[in-house]
């Protein structure tokens, strides 16, 4: 029987070219994570449903991929009493694929609370799965790339996360703006306009200020049932201009009498002071309309956007006060960020920021002209590998055209040839596939010439 | 509601310490793969059941983790006609988690046949899932780590795979023996003793020679129905001694008249010649009793064992002639190896081969004595990070004991302290956590001192 070769919708294969680029991004991020003392953990793809259910809202529960139990799972099920999926589920599935990295991380922290060093800094780069309707840019399997520190409420952690964002995007060559806000300031605002219970309504509307403009925001606030007076009271805030310090001064006038608001202003002031001393390359913007993940975050909120590409947020995060409470370990404050690997990939593609060769690609191909030539080349091939050059020799003496096509297809920048004349002269001919030039070199000079050409690429 | 924090049986969390060690192994292997021109691919965790079913035998089908369909999957099912699991399955599941990396690789090659450069060399390091009964050393989720080249029948590929094995284990510091054999030689033997149809019976018995000895092997051959005469004819082979060339000479006498056997001897001779010129550090052994994965391999067979640890095979592979045939693309010959990451981990643990610090671990912790001291330290922390040193500063001025305990728990080798006197002298005190000594250094000398201490570790 011949099987059709296809993959489930919403999933992807990553071939060598895409992998080299993805790894370039992820390796850069990992390196920065480690420079700041964040260390990797991995959790299983499958979690018990009791760990996952109820953590992502009703909609999230529906989007979990569930694993069918093994063996004869219908043995004790009376099918005549089953009236639908929800009757059957408890009997046939007790595990699901992880939906994000945050809940497994919380579960991990609680399960290993006695062994872990606190403050615990971890990074985690693993795929997650969601049974969402697939569409452009939305997949059923995708990588998340998170760094979090739990067990410390020092704002130095927030500052270092922004420094990490700065270092990652500097190294990748992407110019970014980091927008920061603080939930406590938003809560102070809601209280100051007499609508402390309407925090979510208010922020959901003003979150759209960039997209729909002030008038539509005001309309939406009215639709959400905010009294005209409250909407008017909010206007100065929406129009607050100037740098972060100027904004904080105007805010003090509006929310300075609200305890939570004052705390938010204090936190923002400390964070800005840390960042002012950090020699950041990125643009920093205190954006009062940033309300990302508000139901979740309790302090700082971050969002990163690329300046030269019209794409949404490529990184975001914030502080949360009770990550592990749901697993029976309350009062563990944490702060974290998540890099959007797929979107960063798209930005780098659009701006052509990927290097031509990377650690993953083959640097040199030796052509194969026959058994004697092969034997002449093999020690040189080994030597280059020992020197750290990714090197291949074509495994058989196929037609030259076929071998050159292989070099082209694999995008190999350098090709080495050795026929009778090279063998007689103890030399090799080195061809630059991009520039087109070629030179015949003494055997002893080949490695150095290759090294120099690769450095220049 | 508080959720219990536990993970499904047979799965594992990997904490930072274990991850650092696993990454040390996997990074070493990846680096070698790339030096030989193998490039990474990744395939989705979920495959269509039509891709997976029937590829691993009946037992394998049972061990697949199946994914429940989403939505109202019972809508069109008449439950009254369902008499057991097998009636229900087709209605409720059409995807499964990958069981190995070989079948997804074959599917990938066929699906992308028109874009891939052939010979196609890929490596793939991803988890696989099997609903096996968990036991010591056997998990339901574990990583496979494969390198394969398809579309070339040159024996240079086999030789390079052995070179890769040699380079990987040299770099890891594990002394190994590589056993090699060839299925064509075994087939020649079966034919020579008049039992060409009994190849599997013969090899399954002689595969155990190391474990159970010659007498038990002969008993088993008899039990499997081999005539006494055939068993006697086999004895000279089982006792064949000497180096690989001597063995090939004796074999020629026994199977030289069998076409397939002669082909096997030729292949082995060419491979041995390649390897003789390869300056290998490993021990090489032509082992006629090696029959690993025989139903699968059609040419060379490899198996790698650690010399100083009593553990089974830590790496294995071989050539197969028809990997992609089942997906409608016949005649694609390939050869590959698979590294057993879990077992290599156990060997390295047992022999204490892991380095004390690695790319994943924090190298330096700055203690935090208060706001002024923190501000004094922060530029130095940044500088070290820019120089590639993984550096943390404790995020708040906790008690010294607590901060030191954190350094201990995280196994951080160097601690930097700066109090009033260091600040006054523009200096830092550097403490070596392993050796116990400490020195106070001018600020300008700190990075160099740290670099030297880390180099020595």
Image (cartoon, coloured by chain):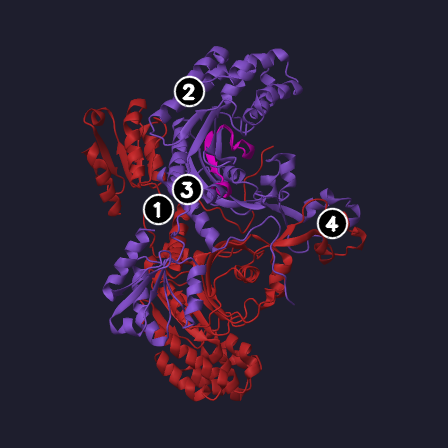
Chain colours: A red, B purple
In the picture of the structure, the residue carrying the numbered disc 4 is: B77
| Mark 1 → mark 3, Cα distance in angstroms | 13 Å
Where does the image place residue A439, in percent across and percent down from the top left? 19, 35
Where does the image place residue A190, in percent across and percent down from the top left? 52, 83
Disc 1, SS = loop
Residue at the location (35% across, 46% down)? A359
Whether residue A189 is visible to the viewer of this picture, yes or no, is no
Closest to the camera, between mark 2 and mark 1, is 2
* Circle nearer the N terminus (3, 4): 3
Mark 3: few/some/many CA within 10 Å (<14, 14-19, 20+): many
The label number, if any, that marks residue B243 in the structure image: 2
Where does the image place residue B313, in percent across and percent down from the top left? 50, 34
| Mark 4 → mark 1, Cα distance in angstroms | 52 Å
Q: To which chain does the residue with label 1 belong?
A: A
Marks 4 & 2 on one chain: yes
Marks 3 & 4 on one chain: yes
| Mark 2 → mark 1, Cα distance in angstroms | 39 Å
Disc 4, SS = loop
The residue nearer to you, when weighing B246 against A256, is B246
């Amino acid at each position: 029987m011949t099987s059709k070769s296809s993959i489930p919708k919403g999933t992807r294969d990553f071939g060598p070219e895409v992998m080299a680029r993805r790894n370039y991004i992820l390796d850069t991020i990992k390196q920065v994570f480690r420079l700041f003392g964040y260390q990797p953990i991995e959790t299983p793809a499958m979690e018990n449903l009791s760990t996952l259910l109820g953590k992502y809202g009703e909609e999230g529960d529906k989007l979990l991929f569930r694993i069918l139990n093994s063996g004869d799972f219908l043995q004790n099920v009376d099918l005549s009493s089953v009236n639908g999926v929800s009757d059957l589920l408890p009997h046939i599935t007790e595990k699901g694929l992880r939906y994000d990295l945050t809940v497994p991380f919380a579960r991990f922290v609680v399960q290993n609370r006695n062994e872990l060093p606190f403050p615990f800094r971890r990074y985690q780069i693993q795929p997650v799965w969601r049974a969402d309707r697939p569409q452009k840019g939305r997949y059923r399997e995708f990588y998340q790339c998170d760094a979090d520190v739990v067990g410390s409420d020092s704002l130095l952690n927030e500052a270092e996360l922004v420094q990490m964002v700065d270092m990652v995007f500097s190294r990748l060559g992407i110019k970014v703006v980091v927008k920061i806000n603080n939930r406590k300031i938003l809560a102070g605002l809601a209280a100051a306009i007499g609508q402390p219970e309407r925090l979510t309504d208010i922020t959901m509307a003003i979150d759209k200020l960039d997209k729909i403009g002030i008038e539509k925001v005001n309309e939406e606030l009215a639709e959400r049932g905010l009294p005209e007076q409250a909407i008017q009271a909010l206007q100065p805030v929406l129009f607050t201009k100037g740098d972060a310090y100027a904004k904080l001064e105007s805010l003090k006038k509006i929310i300075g009498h609200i305890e939570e608001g004052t705390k938010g202003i204090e936190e923002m002031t400390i964070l800005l002071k840390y960042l002012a001393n950090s020699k950041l390359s990125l643009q920093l913007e205190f954006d009062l309309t940033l309300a990302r993940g508000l139901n979740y975050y309790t302090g700082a909120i971050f969002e990163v956007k690329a300046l030269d590409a019209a794409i949404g947020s490529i990184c975001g995060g914030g502080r949360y006060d009770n990550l592990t409470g749901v697993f029976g370990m309350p009062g563990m404050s944490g702060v974290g960020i998540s890099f959007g690997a797929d979107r960063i990939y798209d930005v780098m593609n659009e701006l052509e920021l990927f290097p031509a060769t990377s650690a993953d690609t083959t640097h040199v191909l030796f052509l194969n002209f026959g058994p004697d030539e092969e034997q002449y080349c093999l020690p040189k091939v080994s030597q280059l590998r020992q020197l750290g050059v990714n090197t291949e020799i074509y495994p058989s003496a196929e037609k030259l055209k076929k071998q050159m096509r292989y070099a082209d297809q694999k995008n190999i920048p350098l090709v080495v040839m050795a026929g009778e004349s090279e063998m007689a002269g103890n030399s090799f001919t080195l061809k630059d596939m991009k520039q087109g030039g070629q030179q015949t070199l003494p055997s002893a000079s080949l490695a150095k010439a290759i090294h120099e050409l690769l450095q220049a690429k």
